[in-house]
Amino acid sequence: MRNLTVNGERLWASLMELAQIGATEKGGVCRLAASDLDGEARRLFIRWCEEAGCTVTVDRIGNIFARRPGRNPALPPVMAGSHLDTQPTGGRFDGAYGVMAGLEVVRTLNDIGYETEAPVEIVAWTNEEGSRFSPAMVGSGAFTGVFGLDHALATRDNNAADLTLGAELERIGFAGAAPVGGRPVAAYFEAHIEQGPILEAAGLPIGIVTGAQGQRWYEVTVTGQEAHAGPTPMPRRRDALVGAARMIDAVNRIGHMHAPFACATVGFVQVSPNSRNTIPGRVFFTIDFRHPEDGVLTEMDRELREACAAAAATQHLEVAVEEFWYFPPTPFDPRLVGRVREAARAQAYPHQDIISGAGHDAVYLARVAPSAMIFVPCVGGISHNEIEDAKPDDLTAGCNVLLNALLETADAPG
Amino acid sequence: MRNLTVNGERLWASLMELAQIGATEKGGVCRLAASDLDGEARRLFIRWCEEAGCTVTVDRIGNIFARRPGRNPALPPVMAGSHLDTQPTGGRFDGAYGVMAGLEVVRTLNDIGYETEAPVEIVAWTNEEGSRFSPAMVGSGAFTGVFGLDHALATRDNNAADLTLGAELERIGFAGAAPVGGRPVAAYFEAHIEQGPILEAAGLPIGIVTGAQGQRWYEVTVTGQEAHAGPTPMPRRRDALVGAARMIDAVNRIGHMHAPFACATVGFVQVSPNSRNTIPGRVFFTIDFRHPEDGVLTEMDRELREACAAAAATQHLEVAVEEFWYFPPTPFDPRLVGRVREAARAQAYPHQDIISGAGHDAVYLARVAPSAMIFVPCVGGISHNEIEDAKPDDLTAGCNVLLNALLETADAPG
């Protein structure tokens, strides 16, 4: 195992410069997928890649591939990347770190004049967050055939239904010419902040990600009857919000029932008509269930449907619970995971195996190529929040692990 | 007591023509205060009033007064009216009926060449609903000194904070020249659909409204911490929505605890950041408590604060419960209420006394002038809903009661 090191200060400086694009007052970033700011970040990234000697390709769904040639141009590239879009109140590291770490690997290889056997590609996937256009991970999902391209391009802005992802990508100049998918991938690495508290609590700079939790996402529509809040006696009400509130409480209870690994979240709620003095006639909300075991997810699904039916019955409501998105627990490639572990050992970084609670582009890439991830701690375990933070030393450590694990793969392809 | 009758078909025709402005697919009306459609409805109303020989005055906050002169021009007018704005998914009768009933009274007096002693005025108050600009009943509230004019004009669109009521009134041409308030009022009558199930259940066409319930409105802000829905273990979460859901459930429970008169509603909810895979860091919602007894409202207030604090504690949240609006139970003028009852008797309409659960412009008018209301049933007790409906015969009955009770007052002022 090689034992090279990146320029951690340069990595940090690039992260901080990128974080200016969409910077919020509270120190976070709001850079929604396919927004003007996303376009600006993409252009800065491409400029940096071209300055580092890479050739840039953009595909029809806006995924960006920046290639540093290898000795053998016939070999498929080893990729490192993540995403540049953020949550509405997101942080400076979620996604950006994986892309900038890939760039720093290339810059380091340039510094020392290192020629890999296979080409190396830095990748920025479109719309990983899924907060402006649902579902999440659409760029990598389309690339790996999880979503049809037309379907992906036709997804609508959650807050402005007349805007599609395709049209918005075109508007910002990132509906590229390259076809989506079919691009050979020797291996895919993704460095990422943990977005959870485990590494920080254990005092470890590196997490060896062995796989990702399974996820079930739902859309729930509760229908009652709108009525005037004043003269409608309590027993005659069909208050959709009261039913929804009990379902939201049940979702939380189901999460706690399957401790310690289950996660259960209602993140999005829309009340209709949402008027102070009208009993809500309709509530739409989303559910996000996660667990490393498929059997537990199936059990949680059963409990959810039971709880929703029971809550609806108390208020004489109708409820529709629709599974919106599912993917099974995904183990990463054992050989690649092993190289990440060896790279951490070679640098003498304390580390532990960890399962990713979040979805990542790597989870889709694992369907078409050997894939692995490297986690670094984030402060307080907090992510999807403007106060998201990470320590420069940890970010450098993660990037060093990425560099050496990636070289091991790029120099011994196949 | 006189025993004249209006032209019920003409009243119905005017209501249906007015309901075309902002008509929704489901047969309701969406005509938000100070919107273009509100402007269109106002202009139609003014045209009808002028065709009926009335002189129209618009005050600074857009309240419209259409005067039919009396024998003695020195006497203050007897007013009949209500409002032209609707809920976002409102019906054809809420508000519109009271204004059109006032117009029908004037048209009937014209038909028979009846000259009243005091002038008669038809009034349309601005922004009764309070769903676009909060609080509700701003036009009558400013007129009666409940709200300062500048404050009222500066209230902001709940969904577009850069739009004020004042600027929007100006835009639609209804920031009038007349000062707000100080206009003498001999008496105020308001005909309205009940917006509740009592009259229909009892099979009665007329409700003699003896007063209005007290109301307490609140704004609640629950603050936790945003975090990624995937990797944040359940016990570490500070999920503002889980806390809010328990508070919403508690509001409903408090309403039921004070049966049969209490009403308790959460109508408006805003979740931040409202993203499917982010634990909500902040939830804002509103509460509407109503009861005919002030002591019970005080007890409900205590229970609410206790329940909110308890729910917040379970999730380590902060909660701020702010009273946003209060008015005490309001009895109407016994002499005017008596005339409404006598008018119903004179026409042999079955009737009962009833307390208004909803706020109405008449509740504010009662602060500056003798006031009374006439209720007619609405189908299924449903209001603030596109399927709101009322029977033509009941609407005619209410208008006949209005005509005779109003004449009794306009001919024997003082």
Image: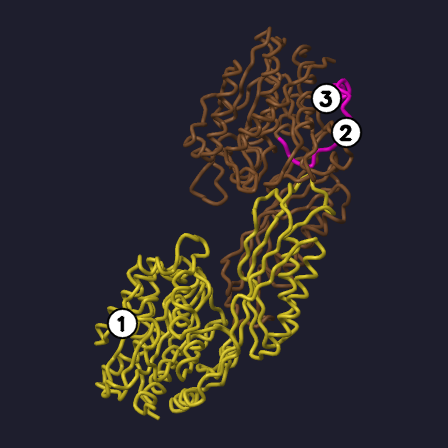
Chain colours: A yellow, B brown
Q: Position of residue A217 (x, y in %)?
A: 54, 67
Quadrant of res B98 = top right
Q: Nearer the viewer, residue A7 or B286?
A: B286
In the picture of the structure, the residue carrying the numbered disc 2 is B353
Q: Nearer the viewer, residue A191 or A197?
A: A191
In the picture of the structure, the residue carrying the numbered disc 1 is A57
- Element on which disc 3 rests: helix
Q: Is residue B349 magenta?
A: yes
In the picture of the structure, the residue carrying the numbered disc 3 is B340
Looking at the picture, which amino acid does disc 1 mark? Thr
**Quarter of the figure with the C terminus of chain A:** bottom left
Q: Chain of mark 3?
A: B
Q: Evaluate whether label 3 is on the same chain as label 1.
A: no
Quadrant of res A156 = bottom left
Looking at the picture, which amino acid does disc 2 mark? Asp
Crowd band around label 1 with a 10 angstrom C-alpha radius: few (<14), some (14–19), many (20+): some
Q: Nearer the viewer, residue A67 or A87?
A: A67
Tell us which disc is closer to us: 3 or 1: 1
Return the mark for residue B411: none
Q: Is residue A228 left or right of residue B42?
A: right
**N-term mark: 3 or 2:** 3
Q: Chain of mark 1?
A: A
Q: Evaluate whether label 3 is on the same chain as label 2.
A: yes
Q: Residue at x 27, y 74 (%)?
A: A66
Tell us which disc is closer to us: 1 or 2: 1
- Element on which disc 1 rests: strand
Tag 3–tag 1 contact (CB < 8 Å): no
Q: Nearer the viewer, residue B121 or A348?
A: B121
Residue B210 showing in the rendered view: no
Q: Residue furthest top?
A: B71
- Element on which disc 2 rests: strand
